[in-house]
Structures are given as C-alpha cells and as structure tokens.
Amino acid sequence: MRFTSEQRLDDGLLEREFTLGEIPGILWTPASASAPVPLILLGYPPLGMHKMYPRLVARARRSAADGFAAATIELPESGDRPRSAATEQARADLQGALEAGEPVSDEIVGRLVLPGVEKAVPEWQATMDALLSLPEIGGPVGYSGGVISIGIRLAVVEPRISAAVLFAGSFVPRVLFEEARQVTIPLHVLLQWDDEGNDRQMALDLFDAFGSKEKTLNANMGGHTGVPQSAGDAAARFFTRHLS
Amino acid sequence: MRFTSEQRLDDGLLEREFTLGEIPGILWTPASASAPVPLILLGYPPLGMHKMYPRLVARARRSAADGFAAATIELPESGDRPRSAATEQARADLQGALEAGEPVSDEIVGRLVLPGVEKAVPEWQATMDALLSLPEIGGPVGYSGGVISIGIRLAVVEPRISAAVLFAGSFVPRVLFEEARQVTIPLHVLLQWDDEGNDRQMALDLFDAFGSKEKTLNANMGGHTGVPQSAGDAAARFFTRHLS
C-alpha cells in the first residue's frame, strides 16, 4: 500500500488517498487517537469512489467522531476501473426485464452481481491486510454499506469482520441467500421501504435468512437514497456497541 | 383525578398513584423540571398494572431521564377490573384455533380485541384531560406500547397524541388495518421477529398500512418478551426527537 496524498479536513480528520496495487482507496483517521482505533470498511454502489465522495466522507466523519477509522476502495468496474462486457450485458438484460415488467430472473441477477463479489471480496481482504498493519489502526473491523452481496460474502469468509451494517438496496442472487444462513456476526440491516431498485419481499426474506442471533432490521419510508438521519444515527450506534 | 399515594424513588423520580373515577393509575414525573414536561402514555398487555410494574417503572425511569413524565392506567379487564364473559369466550376460541393449528379468524380477533379498544381509548383520553391539567405537565403527548390496536385507534381519534412507539405483538382485527391508513403521526414500530403470539406477515402488512410519512420498523430477533436493550434505546430516542 502506498499513500499518494494526505490532507487534514477542517474538523481535523486526516484523509489519505492510497493505492493498493492498481486499486485506489481512501483512508480517514480521527483527528486525535492515543491508541490504535477500530476500522470500518465503507461499501457503496459501484458508481465511482470520487462520485460517491460526499456521502463517503460524511460517513467517515461520523465514524471518526465515534472513534473509528474508515476506509474505502474503488470497487471493481467502478470509477476508472475497466468495465466487463459481461456485466454490461447483464445490466442491459436486467433493464430489459424491468422495462418489460417481467420478473428479474436469478440467472440475470447472478450474472450482474457475482463477478463483482468474486473480485471485490479479496480486494477488501487485501485492504484489511494493509490497513491493519498500520500502527494507528487496530481492530475490530466493521463492514458498512451497500452492495449487500459483497457484505454477505465478506461476513462469511473473513473472520476479521466483527459486525456489519448492510443496506438492503440491490438484487441478491439465490446463492448468496444460502451464504447468508452462514453469517453469524451481529448485523444491522437498513431497508428503504419503497426502494425503487429493490424488491421488499426479497429484502425481508434475506433478513430472515441471516444466521446471526443478533440482527436488527431498520426499515424506513422512502426510496433508495432517502435514508433518514435517524437511521444513520442508529447504524452508527450499532458500530459503537460492537466495535468499541 | 385523585392522588392516593406519593413516593420518591431512589433516583429522585416522583411516583404518584391516582384514581380517575374507578380506574387506578400511576404517574411518574422527573426529579427536577423547571418547566412543564411532555407526557408519555405507557401501554402494556392487560395482565395487571401492578404485575407489569417492574417493566413499567423501568420505562418511566428512561422517560424521566429524557425529560418526560410517564403515566399508565389499569386497562379494562386488567388487574382487579371486572372481566367480561365475552372476552373470556373470545380468548378460549383463539386458544382453540391455535391448538387446532387453524388460522385465527378475523371474527375471533375482533371479539377479543375490539371491546377493549372501545373501552380503553376514552379512558386514556380522560387520563390525558386530567394529567394535562396539572401544572407540571405540558405537551406534547406520546403513546408507547402494546395492545397496538389501542395505539392505532388513539392515534386516529386523539389529536393530542404527537408520536407513537407501537409494539407489534398482538393480533389486530382488519377494521383497525383500515384505521391504520388514517394514522399520520410519526411512528416507531417494534417487531419481535419470532414473536410466538403474533403473525409476522400481519405485522409487516400493518406497518405497510400506516399512513404516516415518517415511520420506522425496528425488528429484532427473539420472542415476545425478548426486546433488546438497543431497541428500547432506539424507541427512547424516537420520543426525544418528536416530543422534546
């Protein structure tokens, strides 16, 4: 991992951009910390890390206020990273099904989601290897965010993830429902009740499927991007309970 | 309203028992308050106010810590109040359906729930009349708790109720689903995912039915009495946002 830039934001938050091999990322650490701090990995829809920056830095500020470092990486096929023709085709097929008013087949969802999960999970793990070797970052590690399928796989395969806030805001292939049963860490699942890009019943079934003994569903009115402040606060308190 | 006893609890909370006509009740007010405080009405399953006292006083302590008064009354057919043969019959019919593994008909649920709603709602309103006339209590008023059907009716007919925490832990007759569509106040709905005395899909349908623009579903693992501390905290913060 190589740091490529460093700046103090106005509230003292230290923001450092880095590259991990080919992958760009951003690390935020609290203004002052006397001991190594826990880490929250910030997931997001793969629309480009810099395009998503305003929302990511807001989440990082809240994490830092609670005593946590936060980090994100450019996801596969996000930002300037190369696109795959297969994903483009899957997205077109999804759009076609939605426009035709047809049910979206698990086959299409699998083609759309699984290649990204396969690539992103080892990249998040390599990011954890690098960040946890820094003296200012300890553990435990939380995963926060969307592309819920990535969060599911990461929670199953990566024992360093201690707790996760998952945003039920995207299609999930059936195979990841099966993996969800293997998840045992504490979960806080956010659901937007009228999410235009998500099937509510699927999200409720997925919440039911998670194997975790401690899981909370926090559902609120509104569409995909309408998560209320109170839900963000509740998610932050979940991390404070489980990572502090 | 007539106060019948008064004591300071160890944390300074003032607890006063009262009677309102024939109906006994308890009022808790914060140790120190320089101005009139908002009021939270504490609902509970009609198993007897004194039997439920440990849980009620715990909720009152939390309310007082947040700057609110709290009050409860003995519900119809609860505690020493007279039972109705019709309710006993409805309860036996419900039990019979459950033991036979049959679906519980709306007719049985209506007989079980509606008479209590019809009696309890004007009693809560008379309680509000009395308590809001005390100099130490102002507004707004929140309703908290179970017998969700009482909370629904109260939210529809009583404009002094500004926000409600509703516990989706009991059967709700269809007619109250229709009334739920008329509810417009902010709602925070608690659901125990594996509640043995409740139908999960019915609870989700009811949450969907509420007309409120601002409503949150907070669902947690476990049975009827297993509401986790974090869910109680979230409910308390909801009142702080809406009654303070």
Image (cartoon, coloured by chain):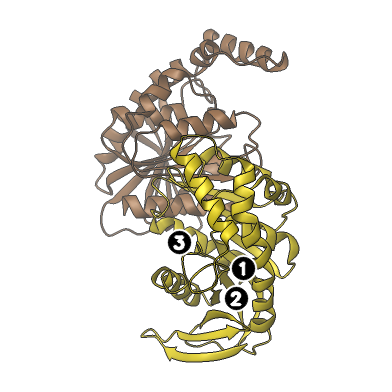
Chain colours: A yellow, B brown
Measured Cα–Cα span from mark 3 to mark 2: 18 Å
From the image, tell me which residue sits under label 1: A142
In the rendered structure, the residue with mark 3 lies on which chain?
A: A
Q: Quadrant of residue A241?
A: bottom right
Residue B137 shows in this picture: yes
Give whichever of discs 3 and 2 has the lower sequence position.
2
Residue type, mark 2 in image: Leu
Which residue is at the front of the view, A141 or B114?
A141
Measuring from the top left, give residue B113's x and y in whole percent.
Answer: 49, 19
Which residue is at the front of the view, B178 or A241?
B178
Pointers 1 and 3 in contact (CB under 8 A)? no
Quarter in which the C terminus of chain B is drawn: bottom left
Label 3 sits on a secondary structure element that is helix
| Residue pictured at 45% horizontal, 61% vertical | A233
Residue B195 left/right relative to B240: right
Label 2 sits on a secondary structure element that is strand
For residue B5, above or below residue B173: below
For residue A34, above or below residue B38: below
From the image, tell me which residue sits under label 2: A39
